[in-house]
Image: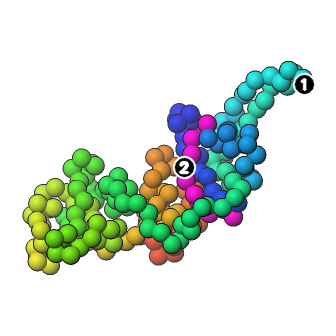
Amino acid sequence: MDNLNQQILRTDVSGMPIEWVTYQNAVRLHFNDQIAYTCGSNIMTIHGGINAASNIRSKVTVNSIIATYGSNKKNVDECSPPLNNRTLFKRDNHLCLYCGNKFDTDKLSRDHVTPLFQGGRDLWANVVSACKRCNNAKAGRTPEQANMELLAIPFVPTHAEYIFLQGKVILFDQMEFLKQHFPRTSPLRNRL
């Protein structure tokens, strides 16, 4: 694995997941004294320059999870995460929620359970992943009107679930940490 591309999970001081950051941002946070504590595995050690006065070379160990001082500016429990196809398809495990088959991203589309022109909205609770064939067959109808069965109920991910959905390569310790912040009834728990 290429450690230079590994995402670092950033949390607030209470341990609430905030975002993914690069190792460069983690080092910057370290040198700005913003890191309260670290946990998880040691991903890499970054060696810096040599101090002219002490003749000691600077060194920063980057862990997979870093907790930073301060608080998240917005209350993450009160807002819905932004909706985009990449995280939607990951939420639905790249399955078409009509035929149940798994597809690559380029073969999936965003389907509005209640179509927009029938008063539906472009929100997490009204969208599912659908293969292009099923989406075309459903057309501008609800699943009931199209006589198609919806295999799962769409849900709005919590902030911790959304952080998981945004992750590219998630290390085991990061996943275990994030999972502790998922609701007990989270559909994502069954996949982990």
Which image quadrant is residue 175 in?
A: bottom right
| Image x and y of residue 6, in percent | 54, 40
The number of callouts visible is 2
The span shown in magenta is 14-24
| SS at circle 2 | strand
| Image x and y of residue 17, in percent | 59, 59
Which image quadrant is residue 26 in?
A: top right
| Image x and y of residue 57, in percent | 80, 25
Circle 1: is it few (<14), some (14-19), or many (20+) Cα within 10 Å? few
- Horizontally, residue 163 falls left or right of residue 66, namely left
Instruction: Name the residue located 47 percent from the left edge and 76 percent from the top edge.
Output: 185
Q: Was residue 15 drawn as part of the magenta stretch in this picture?
A: yes
Residue reaching furthest to the right: 54
For mark 1, what is the residue?
Answer: 54
Mark 1 is on which residue type?
A: Ser
Q: Was residue 156 drawn as part of the magenta stretch in this picture?
A: no
- Horizontally, residue 183 falls left or right of residue 55, namely left
Instruction: Name the residue located 78 percent from the left edge and 29 percent from the top edge.
Output: 58
Mark 2 is on which residue type?
A: Trp
Instruction: Name the residue located 68 percent from the left edge and 44 percent from the top edge.
Output: 29
Q: Is residue 30 above or below residue 71?
A: above
For mark 2, what is the residue?
Answer: 20
| SS at circle 1 | loop
Residue reaching furthest to the bottom: 144
Q: Is residue 24 visible?
A: yes
- Horizontally, residue 93 falls left or right of residue 112, namely right
